[in-house]
Image (cartoon, rainbow, N blue to C red):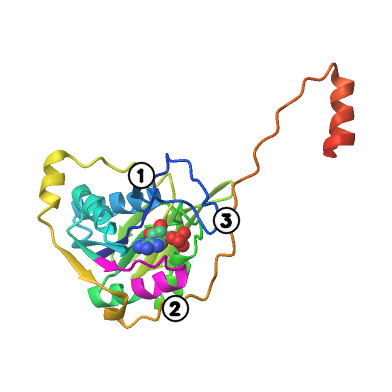
Amino acid sequence: MKVLVPVKRVLDYNVKARVKPDQSGVDLSNVKMSMNPFDEIAVEEAVRMQEKSVATETIAVSIGPAKAQETIRTALAMGVDRGVHVTTDEDLEPLAVAKILKAVAEAEGAELILMGKQAIDNDYGATGGMLSAMLGWPIGQYANTIETKEGALTVKREIDGGLQTVELRLPAVVTTDLRLNEPRYASLPNIMKAKRKPIEAKTPADYGVDTAPRLTVVKVTEPKTREAGVKVEDAAALVDKLKNEAGVI
Ligand code: AMP
């Protein structure tokens, strides 16, 4: 089974996002960028499948600027076989990303696409669903556990307050949730080895994909800053404030 793992380069999850003064988006100048954490989980799962000889080949694909190559190298250092870098300086919306991923999956003959449930930069959480619909493949979202069997997968999905078990016929799309696994750190020898693994350079045009935007980001704003708290004399004063000022009781 060939496994395709889409990996996105995003603002590192430890970095506090700053909104640009013109509110057009998050300021990405001089900030640490890393692989989207949910994609790291997908890479880990793909590598484990390969170690169990369930996956015959693993391919990481990233759509983005030249630096997205670093994200692919990280996946290669974790154990993925090879990469595909679809170069674009545009910040593509999920529909365009899904169209490109569909074309890559078809060109590569992938049977499983293991991807993040959402990218933590824009929080769309839309690409996996769009991709499975376009391919006509089933999708197991928010995977907590994945078991493979002949021609199918059993996926335990994280749902509100519990787990739902579904069975998917291959080919399929699976999106990862936080508890699926704990991604490994790449060892130094594997980082060195990854430098020699191949990354194929492509463009959206190579796949004949129309990436013209259908969606416009109108503005991005910072969350409201919390106001300072006040001390109240007694429970009666607290109840009064909750009732008459906050209006919550
Ligand atoms: P989103 O729908 O934008 O929240 O992204 C969901 C998932 O789609 C991510 O976790 C990635 O696996 C994949 N994805 C989104 N954008 C890209 C990209 N530019 N390159 C590669 N994979 C992507």
Q: Residue at x 20, y 69 (%)?
A: 201
Reply yes or no: does residue 139 show up in magenta.
no
Q: Position of residue 83 (x, y in %)?
A: 21, 62
The answer to which of 154 and 221 lies nearer the viewer is: 221
Query: Would you say 95 lies left or right of 104 here?
Result: right
Q: Which residue is mark 2?
A: 212
Instruction: Note whether ligand 1 is within 8 Å of mark 1.
Output: no
> Residues in magenta?
85-101
Reply yes or no: does residue 99 show up in magenta.
yes
Q: Residue at x 36, y 80 (%)?
A: 209
Specify the label residue 220 is tagged with.
Answer: 3
Q: Real-space Cα distance between discs 1 and 2?
A: 28 Å
Q: Residues within 10 Å of mark 2 (few under 14, many from 20)?
A: few
Query: Would you say 158 lies left or right of 1 here?
Result: right
Dividing the image into 4 quarters, which one contains the C terminus? Answer: top right
Specify the label residue 32 is tagged with.
Answer: 1
The answer to which of 148 and 69 lies nearer the viewer is: 69
The residue type indicated by label 2 comes to: Ala
Above or below, 238 against 192 in this view is above
